[in-house]
Image (cartoon, grey):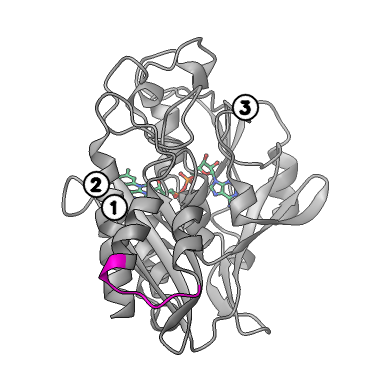
Amino acid sequence: MTNNFSYVKAVSLAQAIKELGSKGACLHAGGIDLLGCARSEIFPVEKVVSISGLKSLAGISARPDGGLKIGSLARLSELASSASVAAKYPVLAEAAASVGSPQIREQGTVGGNLCQRPRCWYFRGDFECLKKGGKTCYALSGENQYHAIFGGGPCFCVHPSDVAVALCALQATFGISGPLGTRAVRCEEFFVGPNKSIDKENVLLPGEIVTDIRVPPVDGTMQSAYRKIRARGSWDFALAAVAAVFETDAGRIRSARIVLGGVGPYPWRADAAEKLVAGKKVDGALAAAASEAAVAGAVPLRDNAYKLDMVRGAVEELLAALLS
Ligand SMILES: Cc1cc2nc3c(=O)[nH]c(=O)nc-3n(C[C@H](O)[C@H](O)[C@H](O)COP(=O)(O)OP(=O)(O)OC[C@H]3O[C@@H](n4cnc5c(N)ncnc54)[C@H](O)[C@@H]3O)c2cc1C
């Protein structure tokens, strides 16, 4: 049962921002996540402000610096099927292609994917958990096989977006517009953990909208890839995922970005592994050492220590595949 709400289809960004100023107003892009949350009454939805008709937020294009501009309304299917994205940023195309199902990728937007709410079954279920203003994270003593092994507490849900993990590895920046003007925020600083913000997962202020995503240019030495491990072959969120971006020089890794998904409250930098491989030629021993470094600092809960092996395996496999 969905409560009644009013609906506005904005004809300009300025109108959308203004309409979002009223109580209970929620932004709608493709609607997959928002309408699910409304139906399950995860948060109050009194007015739906749709930006789905704003052409200025659509599409994927080249930036003057040679990088990529992704409109927040670009469909996940566009990102997954773009030949130029696949050629320059395989990690991003692979992450987008791994999202849900063809129908979800066709309807879901990149902005909506980045700003979707967590999939924790206590948050999504009929529980007054910490995130919904309650006093308890039920995952701590409850069913916690899908929860965080990094950065948990006081809430232990994991960040759900595959695309976010790839964008953090690529050092993307998000363009944001709101009542106070425009700003740009680095992907890494966009997402916040429950120790800083319990009721929201990013730094967006009321009325702010992600307008576009800017991905820096690549040179010929960059290699990248995404590995996602899930319970089913498709239509499923990551149990663990790894996005890796390497700049290479004469067979050595000049610099590395290794970011983990499905294991923390936001895309989780495996910085110990990055440091370990930087400046080195990869062989089996280094790949094994990097995979161990990638789980440094993990604190598994009762039922999710299996994620450690998934991270180790995915990091080792990615290093071997990219640099062999
Ligand atoms: C069965 C199923 C399987 C799925 N599997 C995966 C998966 O494997 N990997 C994965 O990453 N995702 C997965 N998803 C999530 C799915 O990709 C997202 O729900 C979808 O991309 C949301 O996009 P949307 O355009 O429909 O967003 P909406 O539902 O319109 O919006 C989602 C949220 O983001 C906010 N929002 C939307 N656009 C913006 C913007 N531009 N600026 C600021 N806030 C905004 C909305 O207010 C809302 O809170 C799955 C979903 C389902 C239902």
- Residue 90: give x, y in percent of width and height: 39, 75
Query: Who comes first in sequence, dot 2 or dot 3?
Result: 3
Mark 1: is the Cβ under 8 angstroms from ligand 1?
no
Mark pair 3, 1: CA separation: 43 Å
Locate the C terminus and report the quarter of the image it occupies.
Answer: bottom left
Q: Is residue 35 left or right of residue 235?
A: right
How crowded pointer 1 is (Cα within 10 Å; few <14, some 14-19, many 20+) is rated as many
Disc 3 residue type (three-letter): Gly
Q: In the image, is residue 70 above or below residue 302?
A: below
Q: In the image, is residue 100 above or below residue 284?
A: above
Camera-nearest residue between 157 and 53: 157
- Residue 292: give x, y in percent of width and height: 34, 52
Tally of numbered discs:
3
Residue of label 3: 24
Query: Who comes first in sequence, dot 3 or dot 1?
Result: 3
Camera-nearest residue between 175 and 241: 241
How crowded pointer 3 is (Cα within 10 Å; few <14, some 14-19, many 20+) is rated as few
The reply to whether dot 2 and dot 1 touch (C-beta < 8 Å) is: yes
Is residue 280 found inside the magenta-colored segment of the image?
A: yes
Residue of label 1: 312
- Residue 249: give x, y in percent of width and height: 49, 86
Magenta stretch in the rendered image: 279-285
In the picture, the disc for residue 309 is 2
Mark pair 2, 1: CA separation: 5 Å
**What residue lies at 49% left-to-right and 35% top-to-bottom?**
151
